[in-house]
Image (spheres, rainbow, N blue to C red):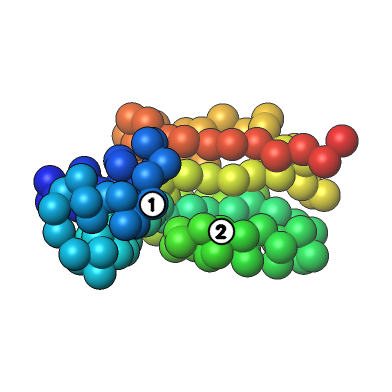
Amino acid sequence: MTPDAHEALLLKSIEGFTTRQIAEIMQIPANRVEALLTTARQEMRHSAKGRIMMIEDEALIAADMHDRIIELGHDLFGIARTRTEAVALVRHATPDLILSDIQLAAAPLALMPWPILCGTRAKCPQFLSLLFLNAY
C-alpha cells in the first residue's frame, strides 16, 4: 500500500475524518482522497484473502457458509461432506483455513488425527489452521 493510501485510510478509519477533511489535511483534491481510499480497501481485501476449505455434511449449512465465505472475499478451496472427501482435498493442496463441522453424520471429525487427514505426518503442513464449528 502506498504511503498516501495508507495515510488516507488511517485518517478515515481511525480518526474518523470526512473525505473533505482528509483532502485538506493531505492538501490534495477530494476525488484523489476517494481514489486513495478505494485503492487501500482493495489492497486490504486482497491481502486478507484466504483459501478456505469447508467440511460440512448438511447441504443447507454448507450453502450458507459458502455464500458467507465468498461475500467476505475469500476463495473456497473446496467442500468436503465426508472424512474421505476431506482427506482427498487436503492431499491435493493445503488450504489456509479449514472450517469443519465437529460432528459429521458418519463420524466425529474431531477424533481423526491430522496425519490421517494429510496422509502421513510428512505431508502435513507445520501449521494447519482449523476451526471446529458446533451447532449445539
Amino acid type at mark 2 = Ile
Report if residue 85 is visible in the image.
Answer: no
For residue 126, above or below residue 33? above
To which residue does mark 2 refer? 69
- Viewer-nearest residue: 17 or 41: 17
- In the shown orientation, is residue 20 left or right of residue 57? left
Binning the other alpha carbons within 10 Å of mark 1 as few (below 14), some (14 to 19) or many (20 upward) gives some
Residue 68 can be seen in this image: yes
In the rendered structure, which amino acid carries the disc numbered 1? Thr
Q: Where is residue 55 in the image (x, y as percent from the top left)?
A: 63, 52
Which residue is under mark 1? 18
Query: Disc 2 to disc 1, how far (Cα)?
Result: 31 Å
Residue at 59% x, 54% y: name it: 54
Reply above or below: 15 against 69.
Answer: above
Image disc number at residue 96: none
Along the viewing direction, whichever of 56 and 82 lies nearer the viewer:
56
- State which tag comes first along the sequence, 2 or 1: 1
Q: Nearer the viewer, residue 108 or 122?
A: 108
Q: Residue at x 77, y 38 (%)?
A: 134
- Where's residue 56, x and y in %? 70, 54
**Picture coordinates of residue 111, whole percent (x, y):** 68, 30
Tell which tag, 2 or 1, sits nearer the viewer. 1
